[in-house]
Image: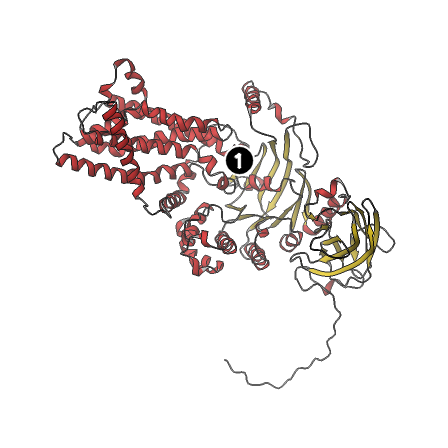
Amino acid sequence: MNSVIKVENLSKMYRLGLVGRRTIAEDLTRFWAKFTGKEDPYLKVGETNVRAVKGRSDFVWALKNINFDINDGERYGIIGKNGAGKSTLLKILSRVASPTTGNIKVKGRVASLLEVGTGFHPELTGRDNIFLNGSILGMSQDEIKSKFDSIVDFSGVERYIDTPVKRYSSGMYVRLAFAVAAHLEPEILIVDEVLAVGDAEFQKKCLGKMHDVSEKEGRTVIFVSHNLHAIKILCQKTLILNNGELFANGNTEEVLSMYHELNRDIKIGADTEVDNIKSRRGNGFIRFTSIDALDFSGKSRYTFEHGEPVRFKISFRTYKEMNGVTLTIAVMSGLSRECLTLAHHEITRQKLDAGITGEAVVEFSNLNIKPGEYPLHFELTDIVYNGYSKDVIDDLTPPLVIKAGDKVKDSEFDPEKPSGFFLTPSKLILNELNENVMEVKNI
Amino acid sequence: MKKSQSESEWTLEIKPVSGWFNFHLKDVWKYRDLLFMFVKRDFVSVYKQTILGPFWFFLQPILTTITFTIVFGNIAKIPTDGIPPILFYMSGIVCWGYFSDCLTRTSSTFITNANIFGKVYFPRLVSPLSNIISLLMKFGIQMILLIGFLIYFKMNGSDVNPNIYILLTPYLILLMAGLGLGFGIIVSSLTTKYRDFTFLVSFGVQLLMYATPVIYPLSALPEKYKWIVLANPMTSIVDTFRYAFLGAGTFNAGNLLYTSVFVVLILSIGIIVFNRVEKTFMDTV
């Protein structure tokens, strides 16, 4: 194993707030310190980068003392909450931003896809944009020429290739852009959440392409995503960033379980922290005050063995008058976000005044889904659904984790293969082979 | 032993910004295809969806020339060294236009390209370089217009004498491009953090035109102020250009040498500052 990227003591400091007259004073102080041979005074006042907490200093460490190695041909995932420093790290890796201290050593050509279609010009035709975008990404004219047909083929927009891209649908635009990027041949490919934009088919295509690039051509891939399922499928190794620091680094399987631990301390409550959940919506007439998953003995946990009963305990508070309360809990699939199963229960038919609190426990006695991670969806509404929901939490972190237990042998599933969601027992009833050789015609 | 061997194979080291003198001129050469593509993009997209298209390139200097002829020639009665005012002003406008376009366009490099620069690495110098090259198209078209007028006036017996110094034109263009680029990238480096300089450029260029013999000949200048205008590196360029095409004014090799040294200096400073800023600008822009 040969290391192709070596990150040593990497730190990056940002200054918050506006650029104004004060920054001139800071620049001068910094210049003076440098001139007299002292250390930059502002490096000392940097604070850990916690997004939600108000700090004392205007200077924060977006990354602090990051060290890791990436070996030749590895697929590496980077995960972390919003503002954890993922994009900063990628920007430094792709030479768009410079580190404050520390360094990175790289072996081989790096291509980074922080966005698809960088530099596309709306007035130019698809053909011209392939050349333009390819050059921006570092391909030579000859290289693009030789790959042109296969780029057009991959994109599937051949009919529009001589039309200005401003006439494209957004999907076609992305397809063309990704097609160019997919034909880059760097030793190291850096990809940032491009998957977020396309449809399911496109996402699969992207993941497949990244897998191929690494598996067949032995290239190194660094992939940043919030989609843990995609990380799990693609990456052998993963690192977690938390508040600018390296929280964990190792095999994806182990690291992901640590990530859930990291997120576990997000308590769902009515007032402050629930509002930090990005995926919450509704009019706030009624709100969840807590959500928890419990096992049979009433202990709180999110990891269950297959076949084990799962209970969800929720409490809520009304903020406006409610015409009864219904609770919906849905178990979703990790990648395609389809609803696998749904529990829908009336809590009460009574009219409720504001300020009333309540609690409910729902049990799934036999959640017959195969081992994996499942995002959860919670919803509170009136008894009569009148067009809008009162409080919806789309993506609860941590998701529900189902593990293979005694009832499922490890051999029966392969987490690499998306082989359906349900574990339905089946038997081979007929098994016959006709030993007589028949003539086979080539059609 | 094996470790030290692999250490030496690193192809790239990403470090904090330090030093002022690490250029990527080699990198710029490697990205010449991109330079070409940027120029092509500018060519194709400038007058997309306009009805008059490249005709605008003609219209702009013609209207300016007419205005100048009326205001400065007929009303203010500024002498033109005995040359038909139209030719006199147009030659000045064409030259000055190219320089000021280069300057204003390159001075916003970082701000207008912040989006691309924030996503992909390539030598940032490619971007202002492509600007000055694509602006040559406009300059070229306006030159054709100027030559057209020149021929017309010559045939009608005006006293204009194009001469051998026309061969200096490519060098003059190079000087203008270098000057515009040098100033432009210095300004663009400064504007990443403090936008104050954008305001300075927009009216500074306008004011500077009056310190250049665009609307008046050098000979019409009182001795007292002559040194100010001569200190302006654009002066000898416009003057030489006019001398070559119209045969009026003076050719002064010393002044041209001064401008050449000035250009080399400003361009060097520009590239040094630009290279320094290109690594940190994402944090401040």
Task: Report the residue at 33% width, 47% height from top.
Answer: B51
Instruction: Work out whether residue B18 or residue B265 is closer to the camera in this orientation and state it.
Output: B265
- Subunit bearing disc 1: B
Residue B264 in the image: state x and y as whole percent.
35, 27
The residue to which callout 1 is attached is B282
- Identity of the residue furthest to the top in this view: B224
Pick the residue in front: A364 or A349. A349
Quadrant location of residue B156?
top left
| Percent position of residue B22, x then y | 46, 31
Which residue is rendered at x = 49% and y = 38% of the image? B114
Q: Nearer the viewer, residue B255 or B203?
A: B203
- Residue A195 visible here: yes
Q: Is residue B172 visible?
A: no
Q: Between residues A58 and A251, which one lies in front from this camera angle?
A: A58
Amino acid residing under circle 1: Met
* x and y percentages locating residue B208 in the rendered image: 35, 24
